[in-house]
Image: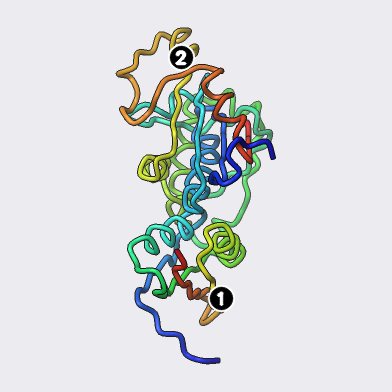
Amino acid sequence: MSKSDPNARKRLALIASKGTLEWAYPPFILASAAGAMGWDVGIFFTFFGLTLLKPKLTTQVSPLGNPAMPMKMPFGPDGFQNINWPIPNLLMANVPGFEGLATTLMKQTFKNKGVATIDELRDMCVEMDVRLIGCQMTMDVFGFKREDFIKECEIGGAATFLEYASEADVQLFI
Amino acid sequence: MDVLKEDQVLDCSGMLCPMPVVKASKAIKTMEVGQILKMIATDPGAPPDMEAWSRQTGNELLRSMQEDGKFIFFIRRMK
């Protein structure tokens, strides 16, 4: 370990690069679990991941890149709910309104199963003092302003994140 | 098995990862060192996660058991 302070708390450094509902979960789940274990945690939100710092989260499921994404019905009898509906990518990408439907189904299934919402997990991270760093370059490219994001986050660039990550025990790109 | 007397009970039934460890960590911080938290969960991922959480935080997992389809943990706040 190359930490400058051997007695420092364990550290987790994450890069959140995707803004869809299904990809918003991993960084916030890992960050809140690490926070619960007393670790020092920081997340760098870049490219599409930057939208996860907006005050009102509007994450949607994107079926693209999830070939034949299995969908479960969040209602009906158990046997019906347990059927996997493999929906081909071609269909998902071409049916208007599919993302809205997939988002509704996934949110309802998560709720039924007792998974916290992205909002709840993010609030938890804020409460645990997880360092939330919005990417300045992405802001410049997409025309975002500081006030477009929650006040609890800070804005920084690659060097800010790398300096933080260089002292981390676990670093993940999501 | 001797009887453990808890100072506080936390019911995480119906919650999935990472909520049981998050709730446990919040609850234990409100307690005094040496006090015991009884935590109840239904998530099958809770037993290995609570063990890892205990190793990472240094709080002692006194007992981990299963009763009526629920997982029950007794944790002593250590620091």
For the point 50% across and 66% down, which residue is it?
A: B59
Residue placed most toward the observer, A60 or A70: A60
Query: Label 2, label 1: how many angstroms apart (C-alpha)?
Result: 46 Å
Residue placed most toward the observer, B17 or A86: B17
Mark 1 neighbour class, 10 Å CA radius: few under 14, some 14 to 19, many 20 or more: some
Vertical placement of residue A148 versus B76, above or below: above
Colour mapping used in the image: rainbow
Vertical placement of residue A129 versus A112, above or below: above
Vertical placement of residue A54 versus A8, above or below: above
Residue placed most toward the observer, A106 or A129: A129
- Which amino acid is tagged 1? Ser
Quarter of the view holding residue A164: top right
Q: Is residue A168 left or right of residue A121?
A: right
- Which amino acid is tagged 2? Gln
For the point 59% across and 57% down, which residue is it?
A: A82
* Residue at numbered disc 2: A136
For the point 35% across and 77% down, which residue is it?
A: B7
* Residue at numbered disc 1: B64
Q: Position of residue A118 (x, y in %)?
A: 42, 41
Quarter the N terminus of chain A occupies: top right
Q: Position of residue A15 (x, y in %)?
A: 57, 29
Q: Position of residue B64 (x, y in %)?
A: 56, 76
Asked which secondary structure carries label 1, the reply is strand
